[in-house]
Image (cartoon, rainbow, N blue to C red):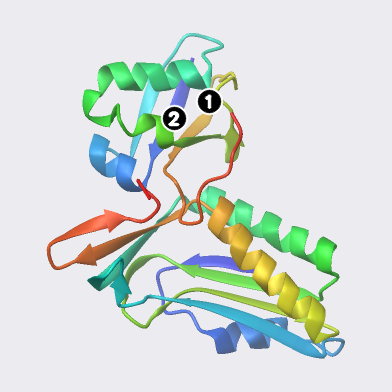
Amino acid sequence: MKVRLRLFGAIKERMKMGEAELELPEGTQVAQLLNLLADQCPEAREFLPALAVSVNLEYASSHTSLKDGDEVGLIPPVSGGAKWSS
Amino acid sequence: MVIITDQVISAESLIKEVSCPSSGAVAAFVGIAREYSGGKRVIELEYEAYPEMALKKMEEIATEVRERFGVDKVAMAHRVGTLKIGEASIVIAISAPHRKEALAACQFAIDRVKEIVPIWKKELFEDGSRWVGWGS
């Protein structure tokens, strides 16, 4: 399945890209996607635990499963401190 | 009304936007680019948004505010791009029959924006830059 990844702020700078289309196995969870990114982009590894993740414009948890056509956002901490539950 | 824009935003225009005959009060909050941060002089600020999600979250906050505080109208404008010191990054204006609800709603709204709206601020110093929220 294909998901569209969007990056912002500090993580966009670190990974030097604003968006990417990813080919992933059906049912991949957010946590697995982050592990994949950590493997492929060692320079981003230290930033990943601090990120919130959105799926289709809603905050997601690490257990959220992805579907074909989903848009996944990598959300660095916002200025008030991101509050989301995993 | 919620907008994200790279143009200068004004409290006056948002106050006009929310004013209506049933409102005895309008409370407005203006967030301003400030010169010093962490003891260092800021040259300018950059704001970046995830626009589709930021607008969605701002709309949700406006709805939440209307339901919780019984106010009349809510307007929010957030600026993106490069801001000079002294320029407004965000304006929130809320109208209500009485001042108590308007002021409480305004406080709540800005606190919520800072919690959940995916917009980020980068401070540019003479000797480097820093994304606010990261590592703090």
Q: Measured from the top left, where is residue A10 in percent x and y?
A: 31, 45
Q: Please indicate, yes or no, whether residue B107 appears anywhere in the rendered image.
A: yes
In the rendered structure, the answer to whether residue A32 lies left or right of residue B99 reads left
Identity of the residue furthest to the front in this view: B39
B17 relative to B63, above or below: below
Q: Residues within 10 Å of mark 2 (few under 14, many from 20)?
A: some
Could you tell me which residue is drawn at 28 percent across and 30 percent down? A44
- Residue B89 sits in quarter: bottom left
Identity of the residue furthest to the top in this view: A25
In the rendered structure, the answer to whether residue B103 lies left or right of residue B112 reads right
Q: Measured from the top left, where is residue B68 in percent x and y?
A: 82, 62
Pointer 1 or 2: first along the chain:
2
B1 relative to A55, above or below: below
B102 relative to A49, above or below: below
How many numbered markers are drawn?
2
Could you tell me which residue is drawn at 66 percent across and 88 percent down? B16
Which amino acid, by three-letter code, is at mark 2?
A: Arg
Could you tell me which residue is drawn at 80 percent across and 66 percent down? B66
| Chain that bears disc 1 | A
Q: Measured from the top left, where is residue A53 in percent x and y?
A: 50, 34
Q: Residues within 10 Å of mark 1 (few under 14, many from 20)?
A: few
Which amino acid, by three-letter code, is at mark 1?
A: Gly
Q: Measured from the top left, where is residue B35 in percent x and y?
A: 30, 77
Q: Please indicate, yes or no, whether residue A16 appears anywhere in the rendered image.
A: no
B128 relative to A56, above or below: below
Determine the CA span between mark 1 and mark 2. Answer: 7 Å
Q: Secondary structure at mark 1?
A: loop
Q: Secondary structure at mark 2?
A: strand
- Which label is found at residue B55? none
| Chain that bears disc 2 | A
Residue on which disc 2 sits: A4
Contact between labelled residues 2 and 1, with CB atoms less than 8 Å apart: yes
